[in-house]
Image (cartoon, rainbow, N blue to C red):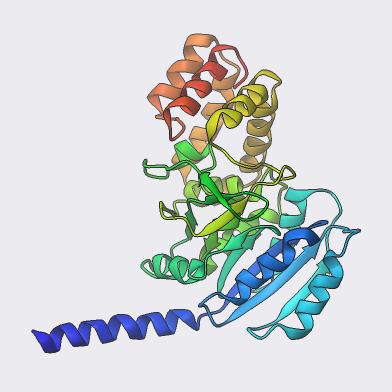
Amino acid sequence: MAFCDHEFRCNIDFKRIILLNFKVTILLATYNGAKFLEEQLTSFLEQTQHNIDLIVSDDGSTDETLPILQKWQKNWPKGSFKIIQGPGTGYADNFRHLILSLNDNQGYVAFSDQDDIWHTDKLAKAMEHLSQLDDDTQVMYGSRSRLVDRESKPIGYSPLFRKKPSFENALVQSIAGGNTIVLNAAAFNLVRESAQRTHFFSHDWWCYQLISGAGGTVLYDPVPSIDYRQHGNNVFGRNNGIHSIKRRLSALLNGDFSNWIDINLESLEKCQDLLLIHNINLVNEFKIARKDILINRLLFLFRNDIKRQTRVPNIILYVTALIGKL
């Protein structure tokens, strides 16, 4: 038995060594991020993963972002480091630009913001999860986040999601921040194919919708893998607490949430041939139900198990349907 245990541990250690040498390409979007960019790049360098390529799309920074990137580019020891010019049309398009910049991908791909701190084992953890499934399966890994302030002091956590990821949930909610997402080659190539056809509202929500809709696997890790910095200039910021509830209610009342759904459904329609047939049908039925009478809107959500992961946001979802803002 002792020999078997030793052999088992050796096999596990050997697998980890192999995984740590697999290539990961980080797609980093920047725009006037000089204040926190050094810490973000340092956290890449300190990853236990050995083989890391970087592609950075800078969307027209006027601060010291580009000089910082160029300094790191000259000394990056883990692989290639490429800087490209962004489209200059905003956050989502900058990530789409990054996605389209990576041709013939055969490895793993991670998305990154410019102002977070990755835990040293972030990529290694993702690789261990992703490697459990067959290479032909489209797999997305994402995790919970620890929230930190401007000085990197912990201030809380993103919500803990306990329900199994699904396309039904993805239609009305994104569960993993883009800064936590890592895709295997099959999943990334699917996302890249979709990006050739359509824009999207946000790359993290789009990855969740597309991969789950295509019949792929979405893995949600409840253990945080990054420190997600909250500094007042975040594109989205924290998604829990009273401020988050106020922000969701505001998005509900002013029609933002409905507009986001419009964008997502239009994008999914352009990629229908990439989805499973029953998910294509669900998208088409959702489009009809949103414009239907009150009782039919509510029945559609209930019968198809379309809901958000936690109680208050789910109540807000049904309020949205009640007042015709779905």
State left or right for residue 156 relative to residue 57.
Answer: left
Q: Quadrant of residue 283?
A: top right
Work out whether 96 lies above or below 12. above
What residue is rendered at 73% in x and 47% in y?
Answer: 199
Front residue of 92 and 78: 78
Q: Is residue 149 visible?
A: yes
What residue is rendered at 45% in x and 30% in y?
Answer: 307
Q: Position of residue 54 (x, y in %)?
A: 68, 73
State left or right for residue 74 relative to residue 239.
Answer: right
Q: Which residue, as the protein is rendered here, is positioned at the far left?
A: 1
Quadrant of the image containing the N terminus: bottom left
Quadrant of the image containing the C terminus: top right
Work out whether 59 lies above or below 323. below
State left or right for residue 231 relative to residue 13.
Answer: right
Q: Position of residue 160 (x, y in %)?
A: 42, 43
Q: Is residue 105 visible?
A: no
Front residue of 20 and 200: 20
Work out whether 122 lies above or below 160. below
Front residue of 65 and 85: 65
Work out whether 8 lies above or below 148. below
What residue is rendered at 66% in x and 18% in y?
Answer: 253
State left or right for residue 135 relative to residue 50.
Answer: left
Q: Position of residue 167 (x, y in %)?
A: 47, 41
Front residue of 17 and 140: 17
Q: Quadrant of residue 53?
A: bottom right
Q: Position of residue 185 (x, y in %)?
A: 54, 69
The number of callouts visible is 0
